[in-house]
Image (spheres, rainbow, N blue to C red):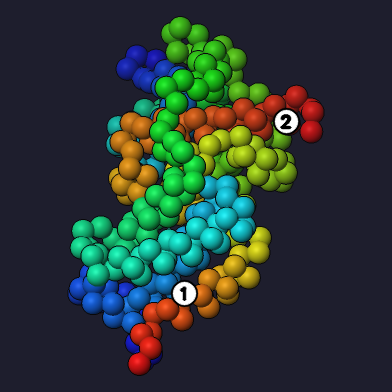
């Protein structure tokens, strides 16, 4: 595994969010993961957590009612009374 | 009223229009960003009521300080920034990271000195099954502090670039990394304990 990041480093890169990492780093992680099933598993788990979080947090319960009230409260303040 | 929100927000003189309190532009900003701000507050773990309150405060402040908007950052960044400062007012040490967090040790203990796994992630298939994660995710996210949850929300759900998240939370890139590691690893450990340890 010469020149390849260690498992510890790979998990750090993954947990920081890989999308914006430099291409070299991403490549290192990919190569490492090809050879290491533990890191593959870690990466898979992190991806699954991300997917589930997007589902869970993108549509909080009671959102519509809150938004209705907020719109009413805020938009009314914008038009200066003539 | 005649101006469509998208059009109002695409104006090249947006900052000047905000400063001049152009009603069409302000209305478009409220309409457009209200759901995002509310969702972020909820995403950071605030209750429905607290999230609604802090969202209202955020936009009230925005409307008040609109005449001073310089347009150096995107309206979105500006609004998220106000939101985080509002949340910080009620939660002391909001974006301050503990020097030491038990999750760092927990992670460290999983590796040998050469950096390879000593205790690799559990082979639980449950941890990649979405329905299993869904069952416990909300509960496991609760174990992390508000600022970390906000950072995670902004990256994972909103998909904002790292640089913008740093600006919103007023933290360095290194600090943001620490926050994201801690939250993701703590959440993973919690899920692993629940699905592998068997105790619901």
Residue at left 51%, top 75%? Answer: A73
The secondary element bearing badge 1 is classed as: helix
Residue at left 61%, top 47%? Answer: A52
Q: CA distance from mark 1 to mark 2?
A: 43 Å
Q: Quadrant of the C terminus of chain B?
A: top right
- Letter of the chain that mark 2 sits on in the rendering: B
User: In this figure, which residue is indicated by the disc labeled 1?
Assistant: A74
User: In this figure, which residue is indicated by the disc labeled 2?
Assistant: B194
What crowding class fits label 2: few (fewer than 14 Cα within 10 Å), some (14-19), or many (20 or more)? some
Residue A60 visible to the viewer: no
What crowding class fits label 1: few (fewer than 14 Cα within 10 Å), some (14-19), or many (20 or more)? some
- When the figure is inspected, residue A19 is found, relative to residue B79, above or below; the finding is above
Q: Where does residue A59 sit, x and y in percent of width and height?
A: 60, 60
Q: Is residue A73 left or right of residue B61?
A: right
Residue at left 66%, top 60%? Answer: A61
Number of marks drawn: 2
Q: Is residue B59 left or right of residue B146?
A: left
Dot 1 and dot 2 within a common chain: no
- When the figure is inspected, residue B18 is found, relative to residue B38, above or below; the finding is below
- Letter of the chain that mark 1 sits on in the rendering: A
Q: Where does residue B31 sit, x and y in percent of width and height?
A: 45, 74
């Amino acid at each position: 595994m010469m020149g390849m990041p260690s498992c510890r480093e790979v998990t750090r890169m993954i947990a920081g969010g890989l999308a914006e990492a430099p291409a070299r780093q991403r490549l290192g992680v990919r190569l490492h993961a090809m050879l290491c099933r533990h890191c593959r598993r870690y990466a898979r788990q992190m991806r699954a957590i991300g997917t589930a979080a997007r589902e869970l947090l993108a549509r909080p319960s009671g959102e519509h009612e809150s938004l209705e009230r907020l719109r009413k409260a805020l938009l009314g303040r914008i038009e200066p009374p003539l | 009223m005649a101006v469509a929100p998208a059009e109002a927000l695409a104006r090249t003189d947006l900052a000047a229009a905000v400063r001049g309190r152009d009603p069409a532009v302000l209305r478009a900003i409220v309409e457009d960003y209200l759901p995002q701000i509310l969702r972020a507050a909820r995403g950071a773990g605030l209750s429905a009521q607290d999230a609604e309150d802090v969202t209202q405060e955020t936009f009230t402040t925005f409307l008040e300080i609109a005449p001073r908007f310089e347009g150096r950052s995107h309206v979105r960044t500006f609004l998220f920034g106000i939101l985080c400062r509002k949340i910080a007012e009620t939660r002391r040490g909001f974006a301050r990271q503990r020097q030491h967090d038990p999750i760092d040790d927990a992670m460290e203990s999983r590796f040998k000195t050469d950096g390879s796994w000593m205790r690799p992630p559990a082979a639980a298939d449950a941890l990649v099954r979405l329905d299993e994660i869904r069952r416990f995710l909300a509960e496991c996210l609760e174990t992390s502090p508000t600022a970390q949850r906000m950072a995670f929300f902004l990256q994972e759900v909103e998909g904002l670039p790292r640089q913008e998240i740093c600006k919103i939370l007023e933290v360095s890139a290194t600090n943001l990394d620490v926050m994201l590691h801690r939250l993701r690893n703590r959440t993973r450990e919690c899920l692993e304990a629940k699905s592998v340890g068997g105790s619901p």
